[in-house]
Image (tube, rainbow, N blue to C red):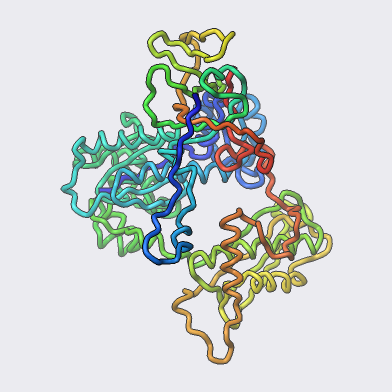
Amino acid sequence: MYALCDVSSMYASCEKVFDPKIRKKPVVVLTNNDGCICAVCPVAKKMGLTKMFAPFFQVREQLEEIGAVVRSSNYELYADLSQKMMDVCAKFAPHIHVYSIDECFLYYGKTNRYVPSEGWEAHAMAIRQKVWRSVRLPIGVGIASTPTLAKAANHAAKKIAGFNGVAVIDTQQQRYRVLSQMKVTDVWGIGRRLGKRLNALGIESAWQLANLKRGWARKHFSILVESTVDELNGTVKFNWDEVRSAKREIYSTRSFGQRIYQAKALRNALVFHAQIVAGKLRKQGSLVKSMTIFAASSVHDSAGYYRKSVQHVFCTPTNDTSKIAAVCTASLNALFKQGIGFYRCGVGLVDLVDEHQYQQDLFTPAADSSALMQCIDDINQTFGRDSVFVASRGVKQKFAMRRDYLSPQYTTCWRDLPRIKCN
Amino acid sequence: MLKFIPLRAQAGITGFESPAAEYKQLGLDLDQLLIDHPEATYIGYAEGESMTGVGIFSGDLLIISRVEPVRNNDIIVANLNGDFVCKLVDKKNKRLLSSAAGYRPYYLNQGDEFEIEGVCIRSIRLHRPLSHVL
């Protein structure tokens, strides 16, 4: 059996943990640079804030009207609370797979014969209560015999009337009850486009999807849809390794807090991204063969959209920060244009090879300073991100993210610990 | 009376092995000593003098466990109408008690927003200020 645990409106819920003043208020959280709404708490949803990813400036008045609390994304806080939530969940099952910052799968083993002594329903409830008690985050728990059904059960737990935060699919009746009340696009892996095609053929509910003939699903759609049909019928088709496998591309891109007009500032930003991707590259044990570097203005600019990108292929695959940074610096001339107010830039590593599988070229020996890189990673691991960095990044970051409504880092910064009144 | 708790910080060195090798393992970790359930524990600063009777002074670090069972008269941290407060809980009479002279008990009303956040399992006095982090 599988259990899917996920936090309801994760970011907004995290904001409430250490700020008791806003627990009963409508809370929304904004994305990077305070651009769009990315999380809405249940109180705010009830007050009519249902549009996710609405640009902040468009809903600003509505937010003021209902007295909503607006927060910038506090990733330090969310990451820490996420870790704690995962630790609590992990105690309930022999295996855990962390799927994203706010959701994890628990796996209880292959045979469906195992049933916890208290029963699945009570077990799900126990996980939910324990997470609430330990971390003060509200979660939904869905339990079923395949990952896709567990996702469906989790959907039911939160969205279908009659389930209060937990749902178990362990009988045919229960499977029918959940799937017949779910839209086909609510099924894991069925996106909007696939959903449209399915709808056109009269397939509206998850239950109808589950009853498709396997071969037909494969012929008219894909192996993925066929596997989904199988999973909805209780046959496990997806496994973690597919999800967990090393990333085949690594990107770091971000919009600037303020427009950038100088070449040097753009270079600093690019080198900053180079550092991030190189660190990620080493962490997953890969080397990069080719990379792309880009810089652009905003698509909303009246002066017209400017976007330039440069591709670079390394003779010898590398994961050396200084080499990746050097390519960024070298491509500056091709990217920069006087008079353009740059709004975004980024670095993408698009062709990766496994460090251990790569065979060195006899005539071009690798000149990576791997010992130096290891040392940099260790220092930054111990003393915090950016304790040491490539100097061409610039010492002062002028393009730092805009986070005007940031809450304190209650759990990761000594200065920001919550204050407790003794009076 | 203040009691000194002797912590055994000694390696069992036997035979002729290099003693240095043993000492490598000796780093004692305060988290391990003070925090029983890291996933359910957080730290805060005390502000105010109402709990001096139990040895909590303004500026002390409080270690709060959300999973520790709440017993009568425990030192708890609670959300009281939107503020985190540190009090002794009198469950029977639904009161929050301070532990310093001059503070009256607080009787919980129906209209109060009140949730126990956790039990204050440890408090730490900072006899010299933490100037390097604060």
Q: Residue at x 57, y 45 (%)?
A: A76
Whole-percent x, y for residue B62 in the image = 53, 30
B44 over B7 or under it: above or below: above
Of residues A21 and A381, the one drawn nearer to the viewer in this rendering: A381
Dividing the picture into quarters, in which one does residue A161 lie? top left
Of all residues, the one furthest to the left in this rendering is: A113
Q: How many marks?
A: 0
Q: Can the viewer see residue A221 in this picture?
A: no
Query: Could one spot residue A241 in this view of the protein?
Result: yes
Q: Quadrant of the C terminus of chain B?
A: top right
List x then y, in percent, for residue A17: 51, 32
Foreground pick, A2 / A412: A412
Left or right: B114 as drawn, with respect to B58: left
Q: Nearer the viewer, residue A295 or B43?
A: B43
Which one is nearer the viewer's eye here, A35 or B13? B13
User: In screen coordinates, is B104 left or right of A211?
Assistant: right
Q: Position of residue A268 (x, y in %)?
A: 74, 62
**Residue at left offset 39%, top offset 45%:** A186
Residue located 63% across and 65% down the image? A347
Residue A112 locus on image (x, y percent): 19, 49
Residue A378 quadrant: bottom right
Q: Is residue A306 left or right of residue B110?
A: right
Q: Residue furthest bottom?
A: A363
- Is the residue A359 above or below the residue A1 in the image? below
